[in-house]
Image (cartoon, grey):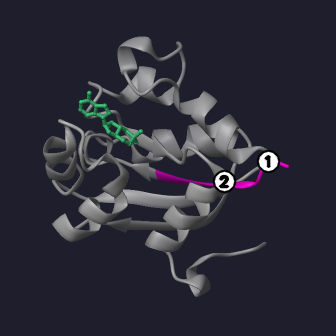
Amino acid sequence: MAGNKTLTMIKPDAVRNGHIGAITNQITEAGFRIVAMKLTQLTQNDAERFYAVHKERPFFGELVEFMTSGPIVAAILEKDNAVADFRTLIGATNPAEAAEGTIRAKYATSIGENAVHGSDSDENAKIEGDFHFAGREQFDY
Ligand code: CMP
């Protein structure tokens, strides 16, 4: 059965460009409930741990540098079929390939600076949610 939570980050590019409100609104209008949320900034160590799966990729250094370059909004979102539905809402990793109206089509500037993150599996949604939020910051309401 598909899980009902996913982890998102509004990335430094979208925060810098003033899109927190518009992106959050598009997320909630699409039926996601925000059950955890914070404005924070990743340290080098945080970003290296969060993206450890990409360690051997040629873009790893660039990814860590970008993700630590400014504040992000981290949030846990709840909805039936959350992981897949959120990935549909944000669009393809490369904004040039993202469907019209998706968050990345509207707000991302490149494959590296692509405005938002969405978990790729229920298992990673749980790991990534617990990475950003203590138990008492994760709500059920
Ligand atoms: P996301 O799916 O949130 O997490 C992994 C990130 O790696 C991805 O978003 C992109 O921002 C980044 N990424 C993937 N492919 C490339 C690439 N070819 N060049 C730079 N960054 C990339």
The picture places residue 92, in percent across and down from the top left corner, at 48, 23
Left or right of 128? Residue 30 is: right
Which mark is first along the chain, 2 or 1?
1
Left or right of 23? Residue 4 is: right
Q: Which residues are magenta?
A: 1-8
Element type where label 1 sits in the image: loop
Please report contact status of discs 1 and 2: CB closer than 8 Å, yes or no: yes
Residue drawn where x is 76% and y is 53% of the image: 3
The picture places residue 82, in percent across and down from the top left corner, at 70, 46
Give the image quadrant in which the ligand numbered 1 is located.
top left
The picture places residue 58, in percent across and down from the top left corner, at 18, 36
Which corner quadrant holds the C terminus?
Answer: bottom right
Q: Pointer 2: what residue?
A: 122
Q: Residue furthest right?
A: 1
Foreground residue among 64 and 42: 64
Q: Residue furthest bottom?
A: 136
Residue drawn where x is 26% and y is 24% of the image: 110
Type of amino acid under label 2: Asp
Which label number is shown at residue 2?
1
Residue 83 located within the stretch drawn in magenta: no
Element type where label 2 sits in the image: helix
Residue drawn where x is 62% and y is 28% of the image: 88
